[in-house]
Structures are given as C-alpha cells and as structure tokens.
Amino acid sequence: MMGGFAAFLGRQQKAILFLMASLALAGAVGALSLPVGLFPRTSFPRVRINIDSGARPAHEMMLQVTQPVEQALRAIPGVRGVRSTTSRGSMQAFIDFDWGTNMRAATLEVDAALAQQLPDLPKGTRYVVRRMDPTVFPIIAYALISHSISEAELRTIARYHIVPVLERIPGVAKIGVQGGDTPEVHVIVDPAKLAAMHVTLAGVERAVSRSNVLASVGRLADHDSLYLVVQQNTLRTMAQVPRIVVGGGPDGVVRLGQVARVEMGRVPRYDRVSENDHRAVTLQVFQQPSGNAVQVDAAVRRALAAYETRLPAGVRLVKWYDQSTLVTAAAGSVRDAIAIGVVLAGLVLIGFLRSWRVTLIALLVLPASMATAVLILTLLGMSFNIMTLGGLAAAVGLVIDDAIVMIEHVARRAGRAGGIAARGAVLAAAEEFLAPLAGSSLATLIVFVPLAFLSGVTGAFFKALSITMASTLVASWLFSAFAVPVLARWLIDFDKWHDPVAGGGARESVLARAHGRLLDLVVARPAWLLVALIPFVLAGAYAYAVVPTGFMPRMDEGGFVINYQARPGTSLAEGAREIRQVGEILRADPAVATWSTRLGAGLGGDLNEPYQGDIFVQLRPLGQRAPIWTVMDRIRRRIIDRVPGIDFDESQLMSDLLGDLVSQPEPIEIELHGDPARLDETAKRVAAAIGRIPGVVGVQDGVVIAGDSIDIHVDPAKAAMFGFDPAAVERLVATALSGSVVTALPGQERFTGVRLELPRDAFAQTGDLLRLPLAAPSGALVPLGAIATLRTVSGRPEIDRDNLRQIVAVTGRISGGGISAAIASVRRVLARPGLLPPGMSYRLGGLYRQQQKAFIGLARVFVAAVLAEFVLLLFLYRSFVIAGAIVATALLSSLAVFIGLDLSGVALNITALMGMTMIVGLATEMAIFYISEFRSLAGYQDRREALVVASRNRLRPIAMTTLAAILTLLPLALGIGQGSGMQQPLAIAVISGFVVAFPLVLFGLPALLRLVLRGPEP
C-alpha cells in the first residue's frame, strides 16, 4: 500500500512533469537575459583619487596636499585604510572601506571631503574620484592602423566617427581613445620681429585671445520688437588668423602675420601608442557594471563591421583584446561538462543497469536540473561569470549523483518484482528513499551555509560559487525526488527489463565478490583498519607540508601585460627605441599573435610618465602554443638578456585587475617602515637580497625616481631693472617652451586650438634656454640669462605613505612555486643581521596578505561545515557514536585533498579549500546512504550482518555515483579548455576526496561502527 508521498506522485504525475518541464524551459529562456561579466557582481570597497597641483616638488606636495587630504579622508566613517603615492605635482591615493559598505555613498563622502578641503589646498589644485570596480579596465579593444593617412586623421576617425557609433550600444559605459595626433593651429612668433615692431609677446597673446569674441552685450527695443544685441568678432578659418591686429601706432597697425608664422601643427604629446610596432590609434570599450560582456562584444563587432565599409582605403581595424573570450570559454566548459556528464552518466547507467530507458531518465533530468538552477540564479539577480559558470560545471557531477541513486534504488526495488507489481513498486520505492535522499542532499547543501558569512574577496567570489552550486543541488533534489520516479514508471518496461543483480550480471558479480571478500576481512578484524589508515594519514600530513600554496588559481587567459619603465627622465624617442627591441622579441616568439604598446600611457586610459608604459601581449589559441606561464617565463628571460635598460614585470590581466581592486597586485610586498632618510637605501638592499631567491622574479625596490628637472631661478632685482617680475618670466618661458593656447577656431566636428609659441629650434639644447629672448615692456629683447640662472636637479623619489606614515614597498612576483614557500624564504632573508638597520621594521602585504585572510576565513568555514554536519547527523540519527563515525570518515576523506594536489602539482588555494569543504558534505552524503540502509536492516538482522549487507546493498549506487562524478569532473581536473583553470583545483580536490571516501564508506565505516557500537541499537 502506498503512503502519502507515493500516492501524491501517482495522482499528480502529469502536473509534476509539466511543472518540471516549465521550470527547465523558463531557465533556458532566463539564461538568454542573464548579465555576463568576468567577475561576480560585487561592490569592491575601494576608491581611488588623483590630485594634480602643478609642478611643486614631491616633498612640498606631500606637506601641502597629501597630508591634509589624508587626514580629511581618514575622518570619513568606515574608512579602513588610506594609501598614497606623491610625486612631483601629483598625488594618487586608494581609500579602503570595510566589505559591505555602500560604495555609492562612500564615493560621494570621499568627493565631499575633498571638496571641503579644496579651498585650503594650493590654488589650481584639481582632483578626480573613481570608485574601483571591474569596469576600470576595458573589456574589448581595437586598433586603427594605416600606412596611407596621418595619425591626426586616424584619431579624427576614431574620436568623431567610430566613438559615437559605439557609445550608443546598450551596456557600453564609455569608449576610450588613445594615440594619434590632435590638429592645432600654431602661431610661431619671431622675437626679433616683435622687437622691431615694438610689440610684446604678452601683447600678442592678449590681442589674439581678444580678437575672437562672441558675447551678448544686452537687449534693444525698436519698432515693437525686442532684439538681443550680440557682439560677434569670431574667427572662422585659419586664413583669418594672420590678419589679427596685434599692435598699432603712428606707422599704422601691426598684424599677426608680420611678426609670426601661422601653420597647421599638432597638440604636443608625450605618449606613443602602437600595434605590432606600427603607430596606431586604439579604441577601448568600457562596460557598464550591469552590462553583458558577450552581448556588448557581439554588438560592437556588428557595428564595426557595418562601419568598416566607410573607412578610407588602407585603414584597418584590428582587435587586440577581448575579455569576453574568458567568459565564453567558461561557458564552453559548462556546455562541455554537461555534454560529457550526460554521456558518461549514460555509460555508467548502461554498464550497471543495462537499460537504455533507465539511461534516458538521467539524460533528461541532468540538463533540466541545470536549466532550473539557472532560473534560480535569474530570480536571485546574479550573472554569468567565471565563478557561476564554473560552479555550474563543477555541479554536474553532483546532479548526476542524485539522479543515479534514486534511479538505482527504484530499479533495485521495482526491477526485481517485474510486470505490473514492479510499476506499483516504483512510487513506493521513491517514498522509501525520500528521507535518505533529503538527508544526503541537505548534508551537501549545509556546507555552503557558512560561506554566506565570508568577507573580503573570497566571500565576494565564493558566495557566487556557493549560491550557484546550492541552486543546482536544490534543482537536482526536486527532479530526483519528483520527476525521476514518475519518468521511471512511464518509461521503463518492467515486463522486459529486470534488475541485473537479480539475474546475476557478470560485471556486478565480479565487483560484488571482490567487495565481499575484503569487507568480510575488515569487519572480522576492524582494528586492522586503524593500522591501514596510518600510512594514509602520514602521506596526507606530508603532502600538507610540501604542497605549494597560492591565492587565486592559475588560469590561462590567453594574454598578459608587461608593465615597463625605462630610466627615469628617458626621452620619448629613446623609450620608444627600447620598446621596439621588446617588440622584436615578441615578433620572433611563435606563441605571440599580436601586441599593443603604450608609452606614456596605460591600459585603461591611465596616464604615465613618458618613460613608463605597458604592452598587452595576445597569444595564439591554446592548442597552438605552450601554457601561458611557460611563454611568459621565456619572454621575460629574453627581455632581461637583450633589453637591460628597462625594468618590467609581467602579469595576466585578470590577476592584475583583481590585485588593483583589493590591494597590491604583486604576490610579494614588503612594506618598510622607519626613518624616512634611510628608507630608500634600505629598500634597495632588500630588493637586491630577495632578488637572489630562486623563483622570485620581477623584484622592484619601490624607489620610483622622477625625471631630472631644470630649475630656473629669477633674480628679482635684475628682473625689475628690465620691467619683469618672476611671474611674468614664468608666463613668457612657458609660452616659449610649451606654447599657450589662446583661442580656438570652430570646425565641423570640433574646435581647433590656436597655440602661440616661439620657434622650437631656438632652444633645442639646455644651454639655449639662457639665450631665450624675452620681450621687455620697453620693447627691448632681454636674454633669459641676463636675469636668471639655471640649475639641473636630479629627480627625487616618489613618497609612499600608508595610514599617515611614510613607507617604501619592495615588491616581487613568483615563478614556479607557491606563495608560502616564497614568503618563508623572504622572511629568512629579512632576518639576516645587518640587512635592516636599527629601528627599521617591515610588514608583508600584497596578495600574500589577502591569501592569509582568505585561508583563515575558509578554515573557519571548514570548521563550521563540520559542526553543521555533526548537528544534522544528530538530528537524523540521534546518536553521537554514528554522527562521530560519519564525521571522522568525512575528515579522513578531506585529507586526500592534499595528496591529490601534491600529486597533480597544483597549488593549495582558495578554490582547492572550497573543494575540501565540499568533500565534507559529499562524504557525509555518501555515508548517509549507507547508514540509512544499515538502520533499515538492523531492525530485523544481527548488527554485524546488517553492517555487511548494508555495504553490499549500497555498493552499486555508491560505485555508480562515484564513478560518474569523477568522470564528469575529469575534464575540469585536467584543465581542458581555456576557461577551466579557475575550477581545476576544486575538481582535483573533489575527485581526490571521492577516491578516498568510496572505500572509507564501504569498508572503513562498517569496520569503525563494528568497533564503536556497543549495547542495544541506538
């Protein structure tokens, strides 16, 4: 007679199947509208500010700007830390808040604090506030290249033709344009002619700026009408500029063309952008936080394909970066995992149960469960990213588990009856197995609960992963509990199919006989189990001690960034020559597909000094080259050998971006604190010492020197004799060296600036500055050397501060080892006598500090998961002995994670620790299946016999689920595909746990219960 659940299934079969199909269909439709991005949608608690305050020296900048700004920022509620870098005339600071802070409000508070402080800062100080989020870097980038038209024309096409087309695309935040020239009208004044015409440079500047006037001067009423009176003396064309009147007297007017040459030029620039060593203009697409990277990429491609037909002949558009490829690769991994999971689960089911109809049930349930999980993600407002997509891929094996155990139980109970009786037994078997299925699913789900309390970047990332996997498990339980029994009743022909166990299947009997012999031996002598476990425990302890550690998993992103710096003060031309040498190395490397170079600028639009920049290197597809870290090591060695004049470091863009969002991107960071006068020399000694550690590469001493400067000191007394003051001299010299934009001409698409300047060849060298002619108010030409002296000043280092005290941060990256081992070597080096002077201390930061925070948080999650499992088991079985035995089995299974990582050469990182936590739930789930069978048998069998029979009964379902899960996770564990690297450590951890949990549950748990169970059955 059927119970309530079985009767419900019998009455509502059609409704259940329709509901399940509707959920799956809704999930498939919802997947089309889910936002897509690289990282989970989270609010990173960091704000960046950039302040510009002229050209004052770094020390004065620190006293006048940095210190008062830092104090104002520290007073903002919720601020956890302020870190700043001060250089000549500029200051950049990062303000860190607590995780969970409302960053929109926090950004406004930072802006308000700076606005309140601004009146007390030096005149002319400007600032920019930017909330840090994953959109600080572009998601797509193109280059405009041509050998037939000028860079100015390329920039015009990019800025005024392509940008408006792309900025209309939904999901696009902005389009950044780098490189190219901006046209400008140059008015090159001849000082000798100025003197001959008795006109001063200041007078020319004033006359040109005042000749271009468009202003409302009032209103006039006449003949019952009210007119707006407008004075319009506007310049429309360059031909009008030479006719501007700049002076006059008894001899007539003096026009600009009489004292100056007017010609087209370009805005002075101190950056260069190239693609494969060809001068180029780049377009960088920045995504809205809520945008869909894949859809934005597709829309940009369509828009550019439509516009390419209008490009001038000889102009090409080349894509050199596409972040969406990582997301599509991760989506491909999910697709492949589902396909492989379906095939492998089908093979396992056919191999054990020998029925294509039984197999068909699993093939229907798996994709339906995954689609329903996507529906849950849609309802929760989540997105597709590397963590949610990885969670879906990793959860395929867990979904198969639930379907297989329910199918196996139904097949075992009903398949032995046959015929009509079997159909009636299907729903009864489903009701019988409902409690174990619910308990086992809850055991797996409960380990994800503590993750909700994780903070930091680990919590931000793994909440997305845990919610995804929990959603998948919920969907899997619903389909396994409700849909599988109904489908089994409809699809399986019990007249023709019987359980192979009942028929004495050969494969099953071989497995059963081997299992039975070993089980009898273990149960007869359970103490031997402890002896057998000693080598395993020792191996686990050894693996724990030697396995390398990391923070985030290594993932082949298909490209990397080289951040470089030439000698401070290096000219743009010399810096470009050195970078061309790097380009030759890249061109000769067979793994490199293309590269994009910025000098004096940075990826994402950041400004750099003219001797600083970056190179983004795009590699060929993964199947056509070695892994990216091998390529990076090879290129790094060649640059060190062939281009010794530059300092550089390499990083993949995602890890670099993540480091910028949460801390410093370098794994090794040594923050030195102490006497400011001794910080720089100490930092150089420390950098030299840790640079000799094997595996530590890209060491930077943190002492960043600005380029040399030429100080002009005006003698006030001598200047006054000629009618000058220091401020007037400053304006004249600035116009001579940099020019002065005094007005602009309107054009079809933009205003063209008019720059007043002196002939550049008049002061090509430093000594020529002293001969620079200055027009005195009397009309006489006075050389600068008559009233001023020059002094060359060596560049001063930037000043780094952390929470109001000065520091120097020595940084480095790691090649071929783990973070913990490298840090241990760094600690030993720093402990050498004499390396750090008295009073000098250090603190380790960078990604190592983030790793330690993450490991501590995940260790707490692991302990909480174990306790939660113990409490759940107490509720299920009301026995401390049984609960303790199951938890002991789960803990021993988790020890296998260290062995698996050590054997595979994969570092222990936060993803692997997540897998280890999952093993606690998965091993407990496996044990619940066994204990539920044991308790059902113990009511009418001898305890020893019940322990043995329960293990035999659960051999097939546990073997099936273990084998299917391992095979499904194998592609991820092998790192097949570009998007699988993020989940590889998790897959290795789960597979390792499964391999050990299988014998522990089927052999170890019966033996352990045989030892510890005493007295009446609990």
Image: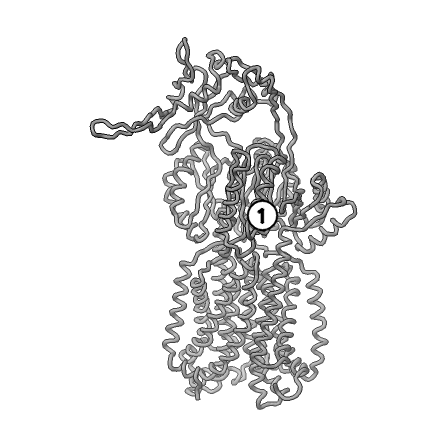
Locate the N terminus and report the quarter of the image it occupies: bottom left
- Which residue is farthest top? 251
Residue at 61%, 87% in the rendered image? 1017
Q: Can residue 654 be seen in this snapshot?
A: no
- Which residue is farthest left? 223
Q: Which residue is mark 1?
A: 74
Q: Label 1 amino acid?
A: Arg
Question: Toward the viewer: 586 or 542?
Answer: 542
Question: Toward the viewer: 813 or 120?
Answer: 120
- Which residue is farthest bottom? 940
Residue 99, quarter of the rendered image: bottom right
Residue 167 x/y as whole percent: 40, 44
Question: Toward the viewer: 799 or 474?
Answer: 799
Secondary structure of residue under mark 1:
helix
Q: Can residue 733 be seen in this snapshot?
A: yes
Residue 926 x/y as whole percent: 57, 75
Horizontal side, residue 813 vs residue 375: left or right: right
Residue 745 x/y as whole percent: 39, 28
